[in-house]
Image: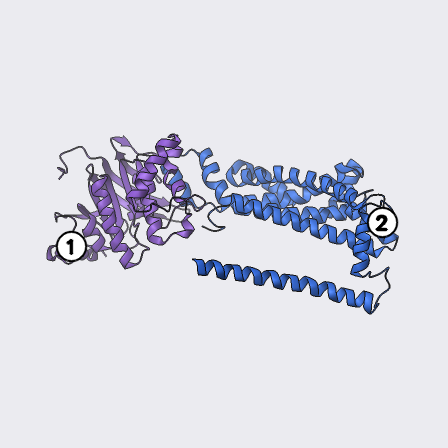
Chain colours: A purple, B blue
């Protein structure tokens, strides 16, 4: 186990706020969020439907910039997206015009990694997510679960320090979802990365997280922090699991 | 899989048979109306047999319109392809640039919107005044007709690029130029091909119109001359040739599209 909090955090948010301005009104989505994520820690942002979870993730990714406070990743202030932060999206954000291989090697290719090295890397992660044999298939030939595997492999292949996942399993059916949660955990055990995972599914949160941050409705701030110290892989029906699940659901309900 | 392949094959054969029946039916009705019933005199509506005879005759004879069928085809193709290729070479990049660069969009779009509604035929008199009745004028007219659909479709194609795809590329460290070539243009490719197909059709149609007005060779010219000579059989020969070449173009472009557009027309 890592010693959280004693190491320098890899992700660090300091009094971060985000307000969208339009001509007629301003909309405060994130208010004064400060949080730290340690290296190789799996943190879940858990909150009600339309809270600013995705915004928070985009702020870390650098796709949006905070209107207050600062975001640091690996000691550097975030001002733009960068290859040190890989993002997996909720909707299939795969390139429909690229094969599975083309999608997975996209990151290394953009960074100018030579063909042989990036092919090997891509193949390693394609194998790891169980898609060997589909390298030359186009996304429109894949199921929803398979597409998300490609999305995860694609983010991994670029070798980011931090993985940002925005409800990656939100659109999958229940059965596929369980399977993907188990696979993601296995993958993460094998290829440790710092993960920030957004979800509104309490079961998923408890199954995956080292630490769960309960977010309030907009303007979002961190209401409570719940550490999950159950051994992995976790059992959905374990009483301790259910207790934590009930706890975070209650905390979340209180925020409404 | 095998069953599926068989099923597919069956469907294809069925489609082929019905297509052949449709064509046969058309030619039979035509034959009956002309050669059997003689509904109209030959110089107004010739029978298919006469048309085939005229076609074979036209393979070698230059009379009465000054060139063999090959001579007319070559003249028309030269004009059409010159104008079309220029139109595509200028139109597609311009459409892409207008959609991708805000400044180009601001600068070019008003001009383009002004020119776009002008029918291509309306350009013909001016082009003849400027370039005479040779290759130049007609190629310029074809250029205008091919150029417009290329721009519109390339523009729409680039605008279809999903923000989330650009985000992905951005988080992978792609520059804006790289995003254009690795994300936006591949996204636009299906629509770019639609533009190329539409403009090929309009180019070919416009060509005949241009040749009817001012020319001394070409398929449109052939139609025009033979009207004044009351040679309906040769008019039909020219019309069918135009249709056939247009079809060959479309088939060729479709094959090209299948080769270049991967992963389906929609994501």
Q: Could you say where residue A153 lies in the image, as x and y percent from the top left?
A: 32, 42
Q: Could you say where residue A88 lies in the image, as x and y percent from the top left?
A: 32, 45
Q: Could you say where residue A172 lies in the image, as x and y percent from the top left?
A: 31, 56
Seen as rendered, the residue at the extreme bottom is: B37
Q: Is residue B101 above or below residue B37?
A: above
Dot 1 falls on a residue whose secondary structure is: loop
- Given residues B19 and A98, the one toward you in this image is B19
Q: Would you call the spot at circle 1 few (<14 residues within 10 Å), some (14-19), or many (20 or more)?
A: some
Q: Label 1 is found on which chain of the structure?
A: A
At x 19%, y 40%, the residue is A41
Determine if residue A81 is in view.
Answer: no
Determine if residue A149 is in view.
Answer: yes
On screen, residue A155 versus residue B249, left or right, reads left
Dot 2 falls on a residue whose secondary structure is: helix
Q: Could you say where residue A99 lies in the image, as x and y percent from the top left?
A: 42, 44
Q: Quadrant of the C terminus of chain A?
A: bottom left
Q: Quadrant of the N terminus of chain A?
A: top left
- Given residues B111 and B241, the one toward you in this image is B241
At x 36%, y 34%, the residue is A118
Q: CA distance from mark 1 to mark 2?
A: 87 Å
- Name the residue beneath numbered marker 1: A235
Q: Is residue A101 above or below residue A179?
A: above
Q: Which quadrant of the view contains residue A39?
A: top left
> Could you say which disc has been placed on residue B225 in the image?
2
On screen, residue A224 versus residue B257, left or right, reads left
Q: Are marks 1 and 2 on the same chain?
A: no
Q: Which quadrant of the view contains residue A173?
A: bottom left
Q: Would you call the spot at circle 2 few (<14 residues within 10 Å), some (14-19), or many (20 or more)?
A: many
On screen, residue A138 versus residue B86, left or right, reads left
Q: Label 2 is found on which chain of the structure?
A: B
Kindly indicate whether the residue at mark 2 contacts the one at mark 1 (C-beta within 8 angstroms).
Answer: no
């Amino acid at each position: 186990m890592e010693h959280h909090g004693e190491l320098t955090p890899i992700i660090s948010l300091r009094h971060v706020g985000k307000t969208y301005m339009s001509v007629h009104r301003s909309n405060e989505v994130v208010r004064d969020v400060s949080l730290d994520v340690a290296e190789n820690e799996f943190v879940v942002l858990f909150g009600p439907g339309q809270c600013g979870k995705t915004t928070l993730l985009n702020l870390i990714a650098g796709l949006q910039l905070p209107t207050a406070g600062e975001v640091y990743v690996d000691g550097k202030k975030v001002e733009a997206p960068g290859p040190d932060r890989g993002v997996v999206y909720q909707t299939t954000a795969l390139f429909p015009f690229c094969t599975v291989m083309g999608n997975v090697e996209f990151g290394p290719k953009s960074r100018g990694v030579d063909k042989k090295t990036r092919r090997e890397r891509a193949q390693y992660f394609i194998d790891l997510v169980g898609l060997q044999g589909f390298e030359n298939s186009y996304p429109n030939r894949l199921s929803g679960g398979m597409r998300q595997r490609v999305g995860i492999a694609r983010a991994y292949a670029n070798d980011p320090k931090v993985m940002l996942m925005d409800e990656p399993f939100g659109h999958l059916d229940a059965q596929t979802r369980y399977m993907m949660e188990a696979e993601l955990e296995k993958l993460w055990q094998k290829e440790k990365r710092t993960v920030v995972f957004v979800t509104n599914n309490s079961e998923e949160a408890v199954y995956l997280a080292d630490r769960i941050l309960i977010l309030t409705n907009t303007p979002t701030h961190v209401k409570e922090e719940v550490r999950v110290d159950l051994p992995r892989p976790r059992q959905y029906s374990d009483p301790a699991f259910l207790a934590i699940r009930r706890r975070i659901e209650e905390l979340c309900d209180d925020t409404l | 899989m095998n069953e599926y392949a068989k099923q597919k094959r069956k469907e294809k054969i069925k489609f082929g048979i019905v297509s052949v029946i449709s064509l046969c039916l058309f030619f039979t009705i035509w034959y009956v109306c002309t050669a059997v019933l003689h509904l109209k005199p030959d110089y107004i509506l010739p029978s298919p047999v006469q048309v085939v005879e005229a076609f074979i005759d036209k393979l070698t004879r230059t009379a009465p319109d000054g060139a063999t069928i090959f001579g007319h085809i070559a003249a028309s193709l030269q004009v059409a392809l010159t104008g079309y290729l220029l139109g595509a070479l200028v139109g597609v990049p311009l459409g892409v640039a207008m959609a991708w660069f805000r400044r180009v969009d601001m600068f070019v779009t008003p001009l383009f919107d002004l020119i776009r509604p002008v029918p291509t035929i309306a350009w013909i008199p001016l082009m003849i005044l400027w370039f005479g009745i040779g290759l130049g004028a007609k190629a310029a007219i074809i250029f205008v007709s091919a150029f417009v659909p290329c721009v519109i479709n390339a523009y729409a194609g680039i605008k279809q690029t999903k923000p989330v795809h650009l985000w992905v590329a951005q988080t992978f460290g792609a520059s804006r130029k790289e995003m254009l070539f690795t994300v936006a243009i591949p996204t636009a490719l299906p629509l770019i091909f639609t533009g190329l197909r539409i403009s090929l059709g309009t180019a070919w149609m416009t060509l005949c119109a241009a040749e009817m007005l001012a020319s001394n060779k070409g398929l449109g010219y052939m139609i025009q001359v033979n009207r004044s000579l009351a040679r309906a059989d040769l008019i039909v020969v020219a019309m069918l040739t135009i249709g056939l070449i247009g079809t060959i173009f479309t088939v060729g472009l479709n094959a090209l599209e299948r080769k270049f557009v991967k992963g389906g027309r929609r994501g």
